[in-house]
Structures are given as structure tokens and as C-alpha cells.
Image (tube, helix red, strand yellow):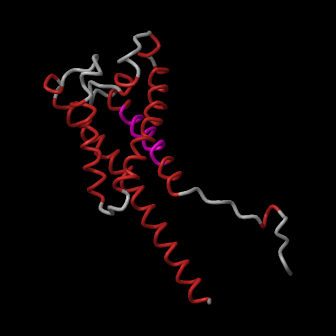
Amino acid sequence: MKEDPKLEQNKQEKALSLLSRSLLTGFIGGVIWSTLGVFLYYFNFSEVAPRSFVLRSWNTAAWTSSWLGDVVSIVMIGIISVAVAFVYYGVLKKIRIMWMGAAYGAILWLIVFYVLQPIFTNISKLTDMNLYTIVSTVCLYIIYGTFIGYSISYDYHDTVMKENQERKSEKSDV
């Protein structure tokens, strides 16, 4: 029995491109790890909440210190994280080791807490932060970088391997 290509059940969905999947990974990573950052703040592992960076630096309205500020911050960090994933995709996607993602996260931490610190006026200087905050945020950024880096690199290498297998099977069929 021949399948009718016009029927809905016989149509195949087009897969997302590697870049689209990488950007989606960035958004999801930003949402997950900034949510964990909110929990670190609420349970006093960190003096710094994600809203301190993306909202409280430029907006001091009362709602920015509430749960709504946390939710808006989480979404904003997810959007910013798309750019972070795009940079990793463009520069480091071919590097397959997990440690590159961890190093990427550590570099992001240095950029946010040291280089960009003058922009975030409501955040204490690095020398004024307690050790718990430094250790917690460094670990959070390393885990975030590992998530972004390893997910993108794994997806890249998996896609390349599938394409190579398809090319080999096409050549063997001819």
C-alpha cells in the first residue's frame, strides 16, 4: 500500500537548524540558571539577586524588589543569554571538551562582576562581597557556562556526525 504524501500523518516536520537550537539552549539556560540564582539569593547563599543586575541598576520602582521583579529578571536574563549562546556558537562550538564551557562561565563571571561592575551601581564591589556570594556566583556561572557550552558543542558534533553518515549512505546507495 502506497502512502499518500498529502495526508497530515505522512508529512515530516522540518527540524530546527543548529543555530536555532543553540539560541533556544541559550534562552532555556538563562531561565534555568537565573531561577537558581534567585533561590541562592532567597536562601542567603548570595547577596546578589539576578534582579540587581537587569532591573535594579536602572529602575528603582517598588515592584522590582518583589516576585514580579524576579520573574521579569529571569525572562530578561533568558533573552540576554541568547546573545551569550550566539557568541559561544560562533566562536567555540567546535571545541568538544566540557571544560571549555566551564571556562566560558568563569569568564562571563569576571566580565559581569569585575568589568561591568561600574555599570551596576547597586552591586557591591568584588572586594566588598562576602566569600559566600563570590563562591556561589562563581559556581553558578561555571554551571551555566558548562550547560551552554556542552549543549551547543554536543549538538554541533552530533549534527556533523549525522550529516557525515547521511553522505556515506548516499554514496553507498549510488
Q: Which percent across, then down, holds residue 84? A: 39, 42
Residue at image coords 46%, 36%: 78
| Residue 36 vertical placement versus 15 (above, below) | above
Residue at image coords 34%, 22%: 52
Q: Which percent across, then down, holds residue 61? A: 44, 10
In front: 113, or 118?
118
Q: Quadrant of the N terminus?
A: bottom right
| Residue 63 vertical placement versus 6 (above, below) | above
In front: 115, or 146?
115
| Residue 121 vertical placement versus 91 (above, below) | above
Q: Main secondary structure of the magenta part?
A: helix
**Which residues make up the magenta segment?**
25-37
| Residue 20 vertical placement versus 10 (above, below) | above
Residue at image coords 36%, 62%: 94
Q: Which percent across, then down, holds residue 154? A: 41, 62
In front: 131, or 44?
131
Residue 6 inside the magenta-drawn segment: no
Q: Which percent across, then down, holds residue 172? A: 57, 89
Residue 26 inside the magenta-drawn segment: yes
Q: Is residue 16 left or right of residue 131?
A: right
